[in-house]
Amino acid sequence: MPTGLNMVKYALLLFLLFPTHSSAQDSSSNGLKKITFNTPLYTFRQSTPQQLPANLYTKNLGFFCRQELLMDKKNIPVRFRLGSMDYCNYLEQKPGYKSAPLNR
């Protein structure tokens, strides 16, 4: 009895060999049934990649992140953080903060 991936391969093989969407039509000339397949042939279409909008990053920021950006544009150095500045810089993987600080 096939299991796992082999079972999927067998099911796919059976599906390809015995399609479920077929219709039988009588041919009046020789008495044999003519089989036509109504299954569509699916082709792989190569789609063009979508271009991302320029404001995608800033459009999806949270409230406090947006406020920080607005204050940075006005040259006001304010940061909103939950926890110490060292721990937040570690979580944000900023340069110079390779290990977690002792005081969180």
Image (cartoon, helix red, strand yellow):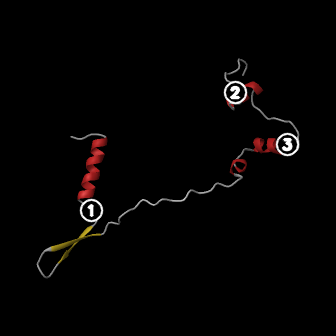
**Could you classify mark 3 by the number of other residues whose Cα lies within 10 Å: few (under 14), some (14-19), or many (20 or more)?**
some
Query: Label for residue 90?
Result: 2
Disc sitting over residue 20 in the figure: 1
Q: Position of residue 7 (x, y in %)?
A: 27, 44
Q: Identity of the amino acid at label 1?
A: Thr
Q: CA distance from mark 1 to mark 2?
A: 58 Å
Q: Quadrant of the C terminus?
A: top right
- Give the CA distance from mark 1 to mark 3: 64 Å
Identify the mark nearer the N-term, 1 or 2.
1
Residue corresponding to mark 3:
71
Q: Position of residue 65 (x, y in %)?
A: 76, 41
Q: Which secondary structure, mark 3?
A: helix
Crowding at dot 1, Cα within 10 Å, few <14 / some 14-19 / many 20+, comes out as few
Badge 2: how crowded within 10 Å, few (<14), some, or many (20+)?
Answer: some
User: Is there CB contact under 8 Å for labels 3 and 2?
Assistant: no
Which percent across, then down, holds residue 37?
Answer: 27, 68
- Please give left or right for residue 81 compared with residue 31 in the image: right
